[in-house]
Image (cartoon, helix red, strand yellow):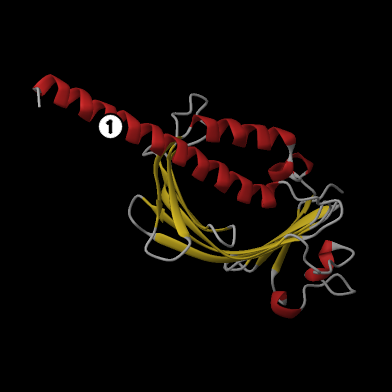
Amino acid sequence: MNPINKHIVLLILFLYQTILFGQEGKYCLDFVREIEDQFYKIDLDNNTVYLHYYSEVTDWENAIVKSDVKIYKNKEKLVFYSDKADIFKDLKEMLLVLRDQKTILRNGAPKDIDNIGYSTEFNDLRTEFFKACVVTNCSKTEKDSIWKLVLKAPVDPTGILFIDKIVYEYNISDRKILSTYVEFRKDYKMKSMRISYLEFDPKSDFKFKNESYKYVFDGSKKAYGKYLGYNIIDNRDK
């Protein structure tokens, strides 16, 4: 074969593979976004969402902080349990329990962050972020029905995001995201973070207490149960 023709054939094959990968990569990204929408677009007016995940955060000295987290949330209330801290929030106040410090912080409800993960602004930002990402890998793993999607994140001119790469592992049959692994840029305090999703229920039957302080305080407004003896700092407006 003429060397020029050989190069043309190789170029055509390369472009063909690139186009196929681009189409497959877009399919993988769209598929993952559809699965994530199950969480970010829940009707919190009428449902309580439950999420149980395990996280590992690594700093640049390779120290690892592990945490087991359970979250219950609806439009007005939040219950958050983890190894290091518990959070109880309603429309009136938020209680932050620091386990290691044996301290309970009482604060007014932070309205500026209420339901931020479900707002139109957040979803618009999320959509634009995914559009700017480049799919560098989309492939089936050795496990049945488990796929891996690797995204190279764009440089963020605003300096708000420090993400360099995101790796999703998901089950294409069950339509579930199994884990996300994020690598951060070197100018960020964290090196990486892995989250393994253990349970997710968009219509949990969890029953909230009518006031958040009742998770921590008894009828006389004293800490009780596993929080007995904790120091109390009240930062609410008097």
- Residue drawn at x 50%, y 38% as measured from the top left: 26
Identify which amino acid the numbered label 1 is placed on. Phe
Residue underneath mark 1: 14
Count the numbered circles shown. Answer: 1
Q: Which residue of the protein is positioned furthest toward the left in this rendering? A: 2
Considering every residue shown, the one lying at the far front of the view is: 1
- Tell me: 55 left or right of 2: right
Depth check: give the residue in front, 134 or 15: 15
Classify mark 1: residues with Cα within 10 Å, few (<14), some (14-19) or many (20+): few
Instruction: Check the image and name the residue furthest to the top.
Output: 4
Q: Point out residue 173 in the picture as x, y percentages from the top left corner.
A: 56, 61
User: Residue 158, percent across and down?
Assistant: 52, 25
Question: Left or right: where does residue 170 sit relative to residue 15?
Answer: right
- SS type, badge 1: helix
Which residue appears at 70% of the width and 78% of the height?
A: 226
| 56 with respect to 205 (left or right) | left
For residue 146, say whether it is visible.
yes
Q: Position of residue 218 (x, y in %)?
A: 85, 74
Query: Image height check: is 79 above or below 91?
Result: below
> Residue at the spot x=16%, y=22% of the render?
5
x, y percent for residue 114: 76, 45
Q: Nearer the viewer, residue 225 or 201?
A: 201
Residue that sits furthest to the bottom in the current view: 225
Residue 189 visible, this angle: no
Res 233 quadrant in image: bottom right
Q: Quadrant of the N terminus?
A: top left
Q: Give the residue displayed 13% in from the left and 19% down from the top.
A: 4
**Residue 9 quadrant:** top left
118 vs 150, nearest the viewer = 150
Left or right? Give the position of 48 relative to 135. right
Residue closer to the observer: 128 or 94: 128
